[in-house]
Image: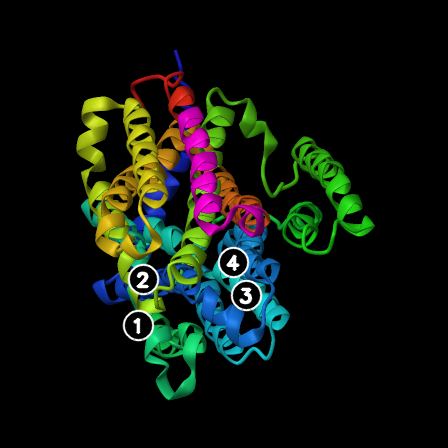
Amino acid sequence: MTRTTTPTTTRTTPAARTSTALASAPALSALGLFALLLGTSLPSTDFFIVNVALPAIEHDLDASPSALEMVAAGYAVAYAVLLVLGGRLGDAYGRRRLFLWGVAGFGITSLACGVAPDAWSLVAFRAAQGAASALMLPQVLATVHATTRGERRARAVALYGAVSGLAMVLGQVLGGVLVSADIAGTGWRMAFLINVPVVVLAWPLALRSVPDSRAEQPKRGDVGGTVLLAAALIALLLPLTEGRAAGWPLWAVLALLASPLLIWAFALVERRAERTGGSPLLPLSLLREPGVARGLLIGVPIFIGFSGFMFVSAVTLQEGLGYSALKAGLTLIPMGVAQFTASLLLPRVMNRLGSRALTLCALVHGAGLAVLAATVLSAPWSALTPLTLAPGLLLCGFGQGIQLPLYYRILLSSIPAARAGAGSGLGQTVQQSGIAVGVATLGSLFLALEPGMGMRDAFALVLGAQLVGLLALAVLSLRLPRALG
């Protein structure tokens, strides 16, 4: 009997291909990681510097309150809309290249912000700054993932999180120092100009030390989805920030009415792209995965409340209490330190409480808001020193320090590993959209109430609105499975 031997075909699994790619890719050196983290620190630090600088911008450029909202929100809108597209461009054309473009763009737009002649020019340059961040930041974790493994990757990701937490503290203090120092008469402008020397250091360092990487099968960009998402966010946010001050003209009403229609059109385009094998900006089929929609919903009160709080507290501390920019920045240090400390304690808290850690941090954060509101309402303005505000800010910081990483942990635990990249992009887009909506909604509520109620009561009422959101977050968290993947 003759035995026939059939040749076998060896199949390479996706995991094996990834392992091979990792083995052959240049390893990320310590200097390369430093360059990536230096770039990461730029947008985060700048966000908090700008918050402290808002009252100085208002006085110097004669900016309306709605223009100030757009200075904060315009950056987040551009970032939210272009974030996923920036990641895909890095996959296709090389992540180091896009990182370098993003860093250079951030430096150029920071310079433009620093010399802006008027408020609306500053708003436009801030939006361009957000677009540069959307090119730069998606490349950081993607490069870390492609060029490290095992313990080195874990350390790199931990450092990435630590830098983001430190940026909050550094941004507040640095913003206050720079605005108060008024270096060469620059005032608030130095809050943007300070980015330029950092970019001059980071760019050649990244060029020399960051290895290049790209996806084996990069996805195409979704131009239609990007345009519709941008139109929907602008149609929602522009009337919320400008409509009240302008007396709700017809264009503002029509834009608000158009925003849900644009969101509906965006959903149709994304579903069609998925059905036809395209590359949707945000794959809506992810919402059908168990727990994903609930995970995204968790982010709504977190990001809307955080950005709204940062905006109204900057205005209240400086315009209401008469703090200098430096004193306002120093006042928020307890919150930043508590947030950073809580983020370091997260693994231990997660091991003991699972998803109930979200319930705990929502209640702690809510208690901080209640203490802060009671302090503001019960004491005369002259008695409200940084020390008297510190207990409430500490509690707020501890709650916030756990909320953000938990949001991503809960969301990504509901998403199959094969779709983790798309899920992360969806989560980040919701984060940046929530930040923009928070400034527009809670900021507009504060500005609308302040003339009639006074700044003290308006501030307390906005804290109350944020507290309602946190209580809803606590209730929603009880419906999550206790153990997270």
Judging from the image, what secondary structure is the residue with disc 1 in? Answer: helix
Point out the frontmost of discs 1 and 3.
1
Residue tagged 1: 177
Judging from the image, what secondary structure is the residue with disc 3 in? Answer: helix
Specify whether residue 452 is painted magenta: yes
Does any portion of residue 37 appear in the rendered image?
Answer: no
Label annotation for residue 387: none
Does any portion of residue 132 appear in the rendered image?
Answer: yes
Q: Quadrant of residue 342?
A: top left
Earlier in the chain: of badge 2 and badge 4, it is 4
Percent across and percent down for residue 33 are: 27, 61
Work out how far the residue at label 2 is from the one at label 4, CA to CA, in angstroms: 17 Å
Percent across and percent down for residue 152 are: 21, 50
* Range of magenta residues: 449-473
Work out how far the residue at label 1 is from the one at label 3, CA to CA, in angstroms: 21 Å
Work out how far the residue at label 2 is from the one at label 1, CA to CA, in angstroms: 8 Å
Point out the frontmost of discs 1 and 4.
1
Q: Amino acid at mark 3?
A: Arg
Residue tagged 2: 329
Earlier in the chain: of badge 2 and badge 3, it is 3
Q: Amino acid at mark 2?
A: Gly
What is the quadrant of the N terminus in the image? Answer: top left
Q: Amino acid at mark 4?
A: Ala
Work out how far the residue at label 2 is from the one at label 3, CA to CA, in angstroms: 21 Å
Residue at 40% in and 34% down: 13
Earlier in the chain: of badge 1 and badge 4, it is 4
Residue farthest to the top, as pictured: 1
Residue tagged 4: 72
Judging from the image, what secondary structure is the residue with disc 2 in? Answer: helix
Specify whether residue 288 is painted magenta: no
Residue tagged 3: 126
